[in-house]
Image (tube, rainbow, N blue to C red):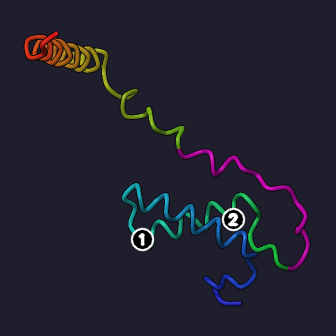
Amino acid sequence: MPRGDKSSYTDKQKRQAKHIEEGYRERGVAPDEAEARAWATVNKMTGGGKKSGSGRDKAVNKAPAKKGGRAGGAAAASRTAAERSASAKKAAATRARKAAKKKLGSPD
């Protein structure tokens, strides 16, 4: 069986890979990279193609599919306290400015 042949995968695995790929595409990942990541995730979860051979009844590990969202706070965590404080002050000033503008403009 040549590399890239998906004939040994079940229909369910193919659907899973398609949905995972769509999720990556929505986040702006290139098409080829999204497909590669999707199949890597399916392989990690299910242990590869399940149509024949041993290991067909092994449990599915869902951890790789849930892993993606945990990396989200890395950007904020890498900023210094001063940078985070400056950002918070700027946000507070914006909220105050918008609240004052809304208060002046509303007939309440």
Where 88 falls versus 49 (above or below)? above
Three-letter amino acid code at disc 2? Answer: Asn
Tell whether 2 sits left or right of 91: right
Image quadrant in which you'd find residue 2: bottom right
In which quadrant is the C terminus drawn?
Answer: top left
> Tag on residue 31?
1
The overriding secondary structure of the stretch rendered in magenta is loop
Image quadrant in which you'd find residue 59: bottom right
Where 96 falls versus 41 (above or below)? above
In which quadrant is the N terminus drawn?
Answer: bottom right
Residue at horizontal 74%, vertical 69%?
48
Residue at horizontal 67%, vertical 82%?
6
Residue at horizontal 8%, vertical 11%?
104
Tell whether 27 sits left or right of 2: left
- Which is nearer the N-term, disc 2 or disc 1? 1
61 in magenta:
yes
The residue carrying mark 2 is: 43
Where 13 falls versus 59 (above or below)? below
Image quadrant in which you'd find residue 98: top left
Q: Outermost residue, front direction?
A: 107
Q: CA distance from mark 2 to mark 1?
A: 18 Å
Task: Report the span colored magenta.
Answer: 52-68
Q: Judge by depth and name the residue closer to the eye, 60 or 96.
A: 96
Q: Residue 30 in the image: x percent, y percent?
A: 38, 67
Of helix, strand and loop, which one carries label 2? helix
| Crowding near the residue tagged with mark 2, few <14, some 14–19, many ≥20 C-alpha atoms within 10 Å | some
Residue at horizontal 88%, vertical 69%?
56
76 in magenta:
no
Q: Judge by depth and name the residue closer to the eye, 104 or 40.
A: 104
Q: Report the number of discs.
A: 2
In the rendered structure, are the residues bearing label 2 and label 1 in contact, judged by CB atoms less than 8 Å apart? no
